[in-house]
Image (tube, rainbow, N blue to C red):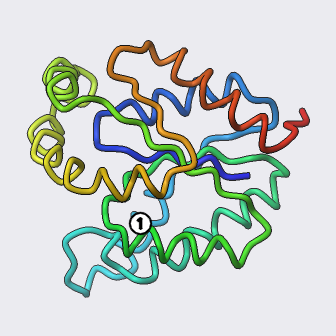
Amino acid sequence: MIIWLNGTFGAGKTTTARQLVRRLPNARHFDPEQVGYLLVTALDDHEFKDFQDLPPWRELVPVFTERIASFTGQHLIAVQTVLREDYWHELTQGFERTALDIFHVLLHVDSDVLAERIKADQVDAKACQWRLDHISDYEKSRPWLESAADLVVDGTNLPVTDVAERIAAEAEKRVVFIS
């Protein structure tokens, strides 16, 4: 199984993933951005604004994910914001060609609370303005994200441990995690 944590930048996806890896036996973190970084280097002679705009990224992420899960024998917790519905559709089509079950989780945080969290983040302060600038993109995408998600967790007023626990409980209903 792939537990794909989606949501806007700064919603707590990476922190939640760390909690899930500790909570779920036989699970590991996988960052689809790494595929993007590989392509940024390999395709530096092509113009693009974001590696998600590259069709090879959307084609390769399901392949990489399946290969890593197969090699390790573990469930993967993928952390990646995908705000374009057409890109999400391409990714899910790729996952349908694999043996993996994809459990799409949307982490939501109300915009005002999210903005305050982003401004208070000292760990990744350089990304502050960039994250703030993408809140409106998330809000525009939110209707399709909610309809495409298997689970929506509103983390506006929840500690990350509670968010992770809700996701873990739902994931465990879908598959037996064997350590």
Helix, strand or loop at mark 1: helix
**Name of the residue lying farthest toward the bottom:** 46
Locate residue 179, reporting x and y percent: 89, 32
Residue 127, placed above or below residue 34: above
**Residue visible at 52% across and 71% down?**
91
Residue 90, placed above or below residue 125: below
**Name of the residue lying farthest toward the right:** 178
* Along the viewing direction, whichever of 120 and 136 lies nearer the viewer: 136
Q: Give the quadrant of residue 10.
A: top left
Q: Amino acid at mark 1?
A: Gly
Locate residue 90, reporting x and y percent: 48, 77
Q: Is 143 on the left or on the right of 168, as rendered?
A: left
Q: How many marks?
A: 1
Locate residue 59, reporting x and y percent: 53, 79
Residue 41, placed above or below residue 116: below
**Residue visible at 71% across and 38% down?**
171
Q: Residues within 10 Å of mark 1 (few under 14, many from 20)?
A: many
**Residue visible at 36% across and 35% down?**
108
Q: Give the quadrant of residue 37.
A: bottom left
* Along the viewing direction, whichever of 128 and 151 lies nearer the viewer: 151
**Residue visible at 41% across and 66% down?**
36
Q: Is 105 on the left or on the right of 87, as rendered?
A: right
Residue 159, placed above or below residue 167: above
In the picture of the structure, the residue carrying the numbered disc 1 is 36
* Along the viewing direction, whichever of 49 and 90 lies nearer the viewer: 90
